[in-house]
Structure formats: C-alpha cells, structure tokens
Image (cartoon, rainbow, N blue to C red):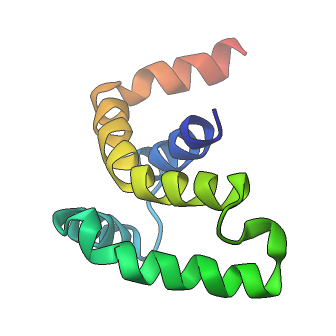
Amino acid sequence: ILSVSITTLAAYAFSRFRFAGRQNMLKAILLIQVFPGLLAMIAVFTLITQFGNIIPAIGLDTHTGLILVYLGGAMGVNIWLMKGFFDTIPRAIDESAMVDG
C-alpha cells in the first residue's frame, strides 16, 4: 500500500507538472533500472547495516529494513509505468474535474 501511494504521487507529479530537473530525474530512474539488482546487493547490505547502527529499528533482521529495501527496489519501475499511464489521460479530464469539483 505504501509503495503504490508513493509511486502514484510521484508518477502524477512527473506526468502533469513541469519543474526544474524533471527530465534528469526521469533519466536517472531509467538508468538505475538498467542495472540488475544483484549489483546493488552489497551496497544495500552495507547501507542497511549502517542504518542499523544508528537506528536499530531499520537494521538487518527487521521488518522495517526489509520493507525499505523492497520499497526502494520497486519504486523506479512503478514510477515509470504509472507515469506512462498518466500520460495517456488527457489533461482536459483533469481540468473538467477541477471545474466540476
């Protein structure tokens, strides 16, 4: 549920709003997804271990740490897919929804 809600908000922002750095962020998301998850395994392990030293609730062998790893791993693909979906919806529907309330 957390992944879907965060992804939906980010994808809507990337699709509908024009802001500085938008294209670079989209390219970075796409570039990160090109590399397999196996390459990031050591970095993620080290990062979660260091977080566990600072905040034990986010460290290894915790549900929160596992949730954060899964959330971060799926976020890029989900944002890209949902942005593509939001791009297919005409802006006129958004405008008419604002007028109708």
Could you say which is closer to the camera, residue 34 or residue 22? 34
Please identify the residue farthest to the front as the structure is shown.
61
- Give the vertical position of 22 relative to 7 (above or below): below
In the shown orientation, is residue 91 left or right of residue 52? Answer: left
Residue drawn at 44 percent across, 60 percent down: 18
Could you say which is closer to the camera, residue 83 or residue 59? 59
Could you say which is closer to the camera, residue 31 or residue 93? 31
Task: Pick the quarter of the image with the N terminus.
Answer: top right
Please identify the residue farthest to the left as the structure is shown.
34
Q: Position of residue 86 (x, y in %)?
A: 37, 33
In the shown orientation, is residue 7 left or right of residue 56? Answer: left
Residue drawn at 19 percent across, 69 percent down: 35
Q: Inspect this view and state whether residue 27 appears.
A: no
Rendering quarter of residue 98: top right
Q: Position of residue 45 (x, y in %)?
A: 49, 77
Residue drawn at 62 percent across, 82 percent down: 49
Task: Pick the quarter of the image with the C terminus.
Answer: top right
- Give the vertical position of 69 relative to 96 (above or below): below
Q: Position of residue 43 (x, y in %)?
A: 42, 83
- Give the vertical position of 93 relative to 49 (above or below): above
Rendering quarter of residue 89: top left
Residue drawn at 52 percent across, 85 percent down: 46
Could you say which is closer to the camera, residue 62 or residue 36? 62
Q: Inspect this view and state whether residue 98 appears.
A: yes
In the shown orientation, is residue 40 left or right of residue 66? Answer: left
Q: Position of residue 73 (x, y in %)?
A: 42, 57
